[in-house]
Image (cartoon, rainbow, N blue to C red):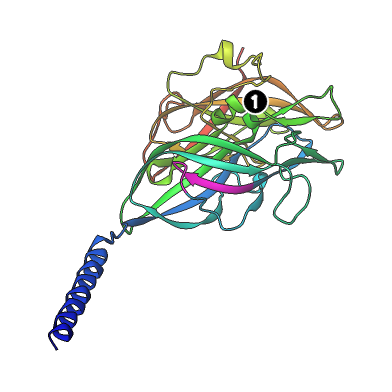
Amino acid sequence: MKLTLHLGAFLCLISTAFLHVGCDKESDVVSIQTGLIDISVTDAPIDNPEITGAFITIAGIKLNGDTNLLVNKVTIDLLAYQNGNTKKLGIYPVPVGSYQHLELILDIQQDAQGGIPGCYISTVDGKKHNLAASPDLLKNITLPNADINITEDVSADLTIDFDLRKLVKADTTNLAVKYQLIDDRDIPMAIRVVNGELTGTIEGVIDLGNHSNDKVLVFAYSSGSFIAASETTTSASNGLYFQNAINSSSIKADGSFTLAFLPRGSYELIFAVYENDQQNQDLSYLGLLDAKSTAGYLLKDVNVEAKNTVAIAVNTNGLLQ
C-alpha cells in the first residue's frame, strides 16, 4: 500500500515537471516582427537602334544574403519598362530592420519558359545574342541599397533600375559574341537600387529645332559633376560616352522625356545628339545641344524632391561649338 502511494506521488511529480517544461518552451517562442517590401524593375534606354529587346531572367532576390524572396523565376524585356514605367515583381514579407545590400541572381542559361539562353539581346535581324557566354548557370550580383529600412506593417518601395547603356557592351568586330554583359566588377555601376519613397522625377519637353530627325538623349548628372572633356569622349574600358550620368532618357518624337527615380538633390541636364544611320543600324555621336529652360530654370541646377515631379520646358540653339 505504501509503495502504491509513493509511486503515485512520484508520477504526479513527473507530470507536473513536464507541464512546467511545456510552459517554459511556450514562453521561449519569439515572434518575429515583419514589414513588407514592394520590389519593381525599370530601365534606362540603350543607344543602339539595332536592338529590339533586352531580356534578363531573374532567378532570385536576397536581402543581406537571406532567403530568396522569389517563388518563381521571371524573364523580363527591360526595353518595355522605361521612362518611369516599371515591372512589379511582388510584395514580400521581410523581418524588420536595415538592409545594406541586395543580391540579384540571374539565370544566364535558361529563361522562365525553359528557353535558351536566359539573358540575351534580340536584334532587328531576329537573332538572339547570349549576354553571358559562360558555363555557369547563375550569375550572382551584389548591389548596395539606398536607405532601405523595413518597419513593422509598412511597405517599402524598392526599385531595381537597370541602365542598359552601361550594362551591355557591344563588339561589332566579333559577330559570334556581339553583345555581352560588362565585367562583373563594373556591373554594380550599371544597376541602381533605389527607395521609391526617397526619389523624384523630372518631366520635360524640348524643342529640338533642326535636330528633330536625329536621336537625342538627355542625361542627368549631380550638379557640378559633369566634365565635358571626359564625358564626351569614350571610356577606354567600355567605349561609353556619358558614363557617369546618374540616369538618362531618350527624347520621344513629340519632344517629351522623363527622368525617373532620381534621389533627391540638384541635377544638371545634358542633351546629346546622335546621328541615326538607318542603313547600318548605328548611332554616331554628334555633340551637345545648346539648351536653355524657357521658364527660368537653370539646367545646371534642377532641384528634385522626394515623391515630387519637376516639369520643365527647354529650347535649343543648335549644337554647342
Splitting the image into 4 quarters, where does residue 181 fall? top right
Inspect the magenta stretch and tell me whether residue 195 lies in it: no
Q: Position of residue 214 (x, y in %)?
A: 72, 30
Name above or below for residue 268 compared with residue 305.
above
The residue indicated by pointer 1 is 183
What secondary structure is marked by label 1? loop
Which image quadrant: the N terminus?
bottom left
Q: Who is closer to the viewer here, 135 or 186?
A: 135
Q: Which residues are magenta?
A: 58-66
Q: Who is closer to the viewer here, 146 or 235?
A: 146
Residue 290 appears left or right of 174: left
Splitting the image into 4 quarters, where does residue 295 fall? top left
Q: Main secondary structure of the magenta part?
A: strand
Residue at image location 24% in from the left, 71% down from the top: 18
Name above or below for residue 90 compared with residue 257.
below
Extreme bottom residue here? 1
Which image quadrant: the C terminus?
top right
Residue at image location 82% in from the left, 24% down from the top: 172
